[in-house]
Each structure stands twice: as structure tokens, then as C-alpha cells.
Image (tube, rainbow, N blue to C red):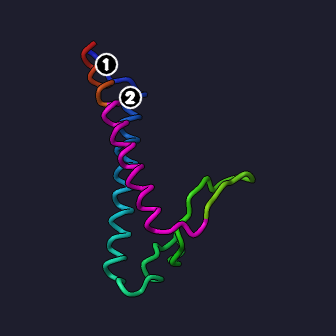
Amino acid sequence: MNLLSQETAARIWECYSEINRAEKLLEEMAKLEEQFRFEPEQQKLKDAFGRRRDLQLGIPSGENSHRLFNVAPKLAKSVIHAHIATKKAELIEANEQAKIELNC
């Protein structure tokens, strides 16, 4: 019996997880835009404390953290869409690797 490697299974799971997270983020952003069409300040996502926050991009931990603040929603959406496309391409590769592993 051929088994899928742990590495390949983890790659597949990570791709699905990232795609799902990114799609949910886009859905939430679209919902807020629709709900608060004429109130841009209310279109911001909430943080863990319920405060509306501007979007950020970066590596947020440690002394050497790197972050951009106040990332425009339009730009953030472009980045999220690109991230989804990248993860879908990686998922195709991981699925092909899985086929190879299972057929050997």
C-alpha cells in the first residue's frame, strides 16, 4: 500500500487553509463595503478587541519586525487575490506530487 508523504499532505493542507482564510477575508471586506457603502470608516475590519483598524502588511513579531501601516483596501485586495492564485498553483503542484507518491 502506497502512502502519501507527510510533507505532501502538509503542503496540501496549508494551501487549502490559506485559500480558505484569504477567501473569508475577502468576503468579510465585501460585506462591510456593502453594509457601510457611504461610511468608509465603518468598512474597516475589527481587531481582536473589536476596534476598527486599518490594514497592515508585514512580519509583526520580534525586534526586527517589518510592517506597513494603513495599507489601502484596494491594494490589500490585489495582494489577497494574488496570494489565492499562488496557493492554488501550489495546490495543483502538491496534488500532482500526491498522485506520483500514491502510484509508486
Q: Residues within 10 Å of mark 2 (few under 14, many from 20)?
A: some
Using the image, tell me which numbered label, if any, was put on residue 66: none
Q: Earlier in the sequence, mark 2 or mark 1?
A: 2
Q: How many marks?
A: 2
Q: Quadrant of residue 24?
A: bottom left
Q: Which residue is mark 1?
A: 101
Give percent across and percent down for residue 63: 75, 53
Give percent across and percent down for residue 55: 52, 67
**Regarding mark 1 in the picture, which secondary structure is present there?**
helix
Name the magenta segment's main secondary structure: helix
**Regarding mark 2 in the picture, which secondary structure is present there?**
helix
| The residue positioned farthest toward the right in the image shown | 63
Q: Is residue 28 left or right of residue 70?
A: left
Q: Locate the N terminus by quadrant.
A: top left
Q: Locate the C terminus by quadrant.
A: top left
Residue located at (38% from left, 54% from top): 81
Question: Would residue 84 be counted in the magenta stretch?
Answer: yes
Residue located at (32% from left, 81% from top): 35
Residues at discs 2 and 1 in contact (Cβ within 8 Å): yes
Q: Which residue is mark 2?
A: 8
In this picture, is 54 found above or below 66?
below
Q: Residues within 10 Å of mark 1 (few under 14, many from 20)?
A: some
Seen from the viewer's position, the closer of residues 42 and 16 is 42
In this picture, is 30 found above or below 61?
below
State how far apart marks 2 and 1 are (Cα): 9 Å
Residue type marked 2: Thr
Which residue range is magenta in the image?
Answer: 69-94
Question: Would residue 71 be counted in the magenta stretch?
Answer: yes
In this picture, is 72 found above or below 61?
below
Seen from the viewer's position, the closer of residues 11 and 69 is 69
Q: Is residue 92 left or right of residue 80?
A: left
Residue type marked 1: Glu
